């Protein structure tokens, strides 16, 4: 794969079927783009529902071999001119996707044609607004922190509290915080903190309630969970107008920084970072999600921007132990990777020469 000089050579390498099941996306300097849901897929006999356990002690359910690579879900150079995948269906990876369920066995397609999530919906909404994506647009998309469905949920919460379901004026401040929230999981946003806390209360009650809330249903649950969210924030922080970055932190050694973005139980932004409250303090520490953000521009020459959550060194005494956490990741910023050798050589911090004590054996 890494030695491929074009799409044909890349596909030839993939035909070996030596990678675990993955969404694989490819693009190159020649203008080609490609998607395959890779993996060694057994040929399953007809007459059984393989989405549930089947008898394993009878020959009728035995595999009939392994599917050829050409049987796998693939998209090559889609008419819309882009591909994206945020753990979604092949049917929603691009506008008018050619990868539709009727072209594949159900256990190979293994998704609803319109299967999507808030990250994918947000990306499609952003890209639909533009004929072309400039460098600044691409960098902004990689660090986008807007929750796609925020306005629908905001309206549902405010309406529920203003149509008689509210238990009184004690929610007045909370309603105004939600009303004024811009839908972004920004470190300085108290609206994000209150909305996140309400969301978690709804999930604890019944995750299925959230889709009904969007439709304006379950107003009593909506209000009761907002009351519980208010009580939680007052207990942990003494107030309800708490900036998100005070609640959501990234930690390296003994230092912490405020974070933007979110990824928790369906509440997910394109900048997907999840946290957990191990000590029941109300403060979430980031521990999963985006681990190697990169934006690559396949021009001449190739250029790229990236950031890792902490730093390039695991040594606490190194200046690169947490420099990217402080200067980049916590601030939604990316740095140039100095992809070209000439750029790299202009930015050397130190050099070290290794000399062998004896000639290396070539046998």
Image (spheres, rainbow, N blue to C red):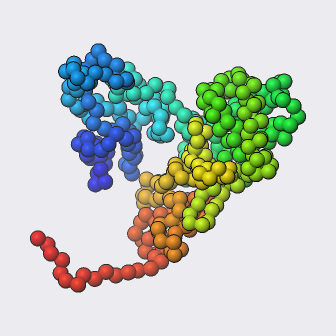
| Residue extending farthest bottom | 357
Of residue 184 and residue 254, the one placed in the foreground of this image is 254
| Residue extending farthest front | 279
Of residue 196 and residue 295, the one placed in the foreground of this image is 196
State the residue at coordinates (67%, 52%): 281
State the residue at coordinates (71%, 23%): 218
- Residue 208: x and y in percent read 60, 26
Specify the quadrant that holds the C terminus. Answer: bottom left
Of residue 152 and residue 51, the one placed in the foreground of this image is 51
Of residue 190 and residue 297, the one placed in the foreground of this image is 190
- Residue 244: x and y in percent read 70, 50
Tell me: 286 left or right of 188: left
State the residue at coordinates (31%, 54%): 2
From where the camera sits, is residue 287 visible?
A: yes
Vertical placement of residue 292 versus 201, above or below: below
| Residue extending farthest left | 363
Tell me: 172 left or right of 292: right
Q: How many marks?
A: 0
Vertical placement of residue 115 versus 268, above or below: above
From where the camera sits, is residue 183 visible?
A: no
State the residue at coordinates (68%, 45%): 184
């Amino acid at each position: 794969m890494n030695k491929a000089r074009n799409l044909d050579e890349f596909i030839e390498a993939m035909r070996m079927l030596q990678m675990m099941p993955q969404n694989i996306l490819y693009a190159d300097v020649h203008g080609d783009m490609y998607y395959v849901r890779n993996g060694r897929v057994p040929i399953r006999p007809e007459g059984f529902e393989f989405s549930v356990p089947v008898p394993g002690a009878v020959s009728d359910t035995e595999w009939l071999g392994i599917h050829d690579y050409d049987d796998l879900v693939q998209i090559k150079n889609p008419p819309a001119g882009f591909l994206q995948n945020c753990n979604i269906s092949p049917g929603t990876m691009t506008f008018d996707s050619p990868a539709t369920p009727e072209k594949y066995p159900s256990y190979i397609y293994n998704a609803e044609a319109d299967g999507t999530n808030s990250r994918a919906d947000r990306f499609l909404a952003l890209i639909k607004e533009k004929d072309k994506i400039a460098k600044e647009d691409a960098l902004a998309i990689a660090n986008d922190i807007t929750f796609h469905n925020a306005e629908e949920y905001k309206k549902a919460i405010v309406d529920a509290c203003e149509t008689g379901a509210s238990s009184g004026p004690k929610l007045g401040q909370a309603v105004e915080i939600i009303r004024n929230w811009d839908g972004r999981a920004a470190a300085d946003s108290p609206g994000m903190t209150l909305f996140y806390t309400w969301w978690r209360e709804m999930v604890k009650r019944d995750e299925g309630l959230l889709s009904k809330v969007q439709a304006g249903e379950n107003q009593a649950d909506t209000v009761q969970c907002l009351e519980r969210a208010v009580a939680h924030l007052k207990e942990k922080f003494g107030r309800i107008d708490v900036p998100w970055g005070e609640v959501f932190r990234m930690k390296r050694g003994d230092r912490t920084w405020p974070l933007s973005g979110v990824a928790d139980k369906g509440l997910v932004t394109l900048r997907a970072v999840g946290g957990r409250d191990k000590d029941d303090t109300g403060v979430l520490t980031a521990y999963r999600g985006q681990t190697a953000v990169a934006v690559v521009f396949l021009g001449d020459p190739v250029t790229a921007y990236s950031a890792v959550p902490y730093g390039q060194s695991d040594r606490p005494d190194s200046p690169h132990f947490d420099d990217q956490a402080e200067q980049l990741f916590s601030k939604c910023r990316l740095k140039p990777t100095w992809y070209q050798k000439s750029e790299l050589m202009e930015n050397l911090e130190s050099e070290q020469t290794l000399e062998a004590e004896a000639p290396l054996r070539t046998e």
